[in-house]
Amino acid sequence: MIEGLYLLSLALFLVTWRTDPGFIEQRDRPQFMRMLAKCDPATLCPYCETSLQPFLQSKHCLICNRCVKGFDHHCLWLGNCIGDKNHKLFIAFLLATLCLLSTTIYVLYPVFTGTIDPMSHRNTNSKTGYLYLSGLYELDHLIFKCLCIVNLIPALIFLLPLSYLLFIQAKSYWGKLRYWNTFASSDFHRLD
């Protein structure tokens, strides 16, 4: 089970990392100068020399040096912007990683504290992963405890911040959906 969650989390990481977040194409200089004369300068990006007006909530990322449609943030862990095209993948990646950390804590904490002996026959349920750990338990008991600590400490440290980040991202994504549905159903965008 842990291996499956790890592979899912890794796959979602790679897909989110490589997915285009919604980069807005840059325009050539003469076309930008014409736009500057006709449009409100506040709706133009001076770095990319493009109009952000048709793409509400778009912003220029100073790290990628490109404008992103529906820009949320630049994720330093992924090395990519999070925008309209990869926001759902990012939330799925966070959810898979949260499940991986929770499962790691669920499996290793009882073994580390000694409440469950992975070598006893009554605790070899493959659904919980103890059978998988029983092979590792044959190592020196001290080495096994160190392996548990090496896996438990990062899981415990990152569980709460990752939960909070997932909550914020889901709230942000849901807010964007509600905003766009309200905007699309109103006659505001049809005004000249």
Image (cartoon, helix red, strand yellow):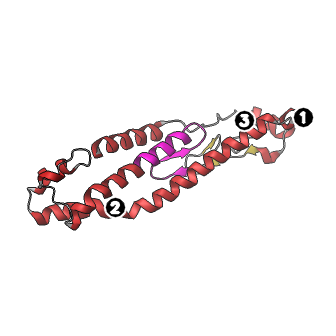
Amino acid type, mark 1: Leu
State the residue position of label 3: 29
Residue 191, labelled with which disc?
A: 1
Residue 98, labelled with which disc?
A: none
Q: Residue 168 in the image: x percent, y percent?
A: 57, 55
Q: Residue at x 13, y 63 (%)?
A: 143
**Res. 50 visible in picture:** no
Q: Earlier in the sequence, mark 2 or mark 3?
A: 3
Q: Residue at x 27, y 55 (%)?
A: 107
The magenta segment is 74-97
Quadrant assignment, res 115: bottom left
> Does residue 22 appear to the left or right of 76 in the view shown?
right
Alpha carbons under labels 1 and 3: distance apart: 30 Å
> Does residue 54 appear to the left or right of 153 in the view shown?
right
**Res. 1 visible in picture:** yes
* Quarter of the image with the N terminus in it: top left
Amino acid type, mark 2: Pro
Q: Earlier in the sequence, mark 1 or mark 2?
A: 2
Amino acid type, mark 3: Arg
State the residue position of label 2: 154
Alpha carbons under labels 2 and 3: distance apart: 49 Å
SS assignment at label 1: loop
Quadrant assignment, res 113: bottom left
SS assignment at label 3: helix
Q: Nearer the viewer, mark 2 or mark 3?
A: 2
Is residue 83 rendered magenta in the image? yes
Alpha carbons under labels 1 and 2: distance apart: 53 Å
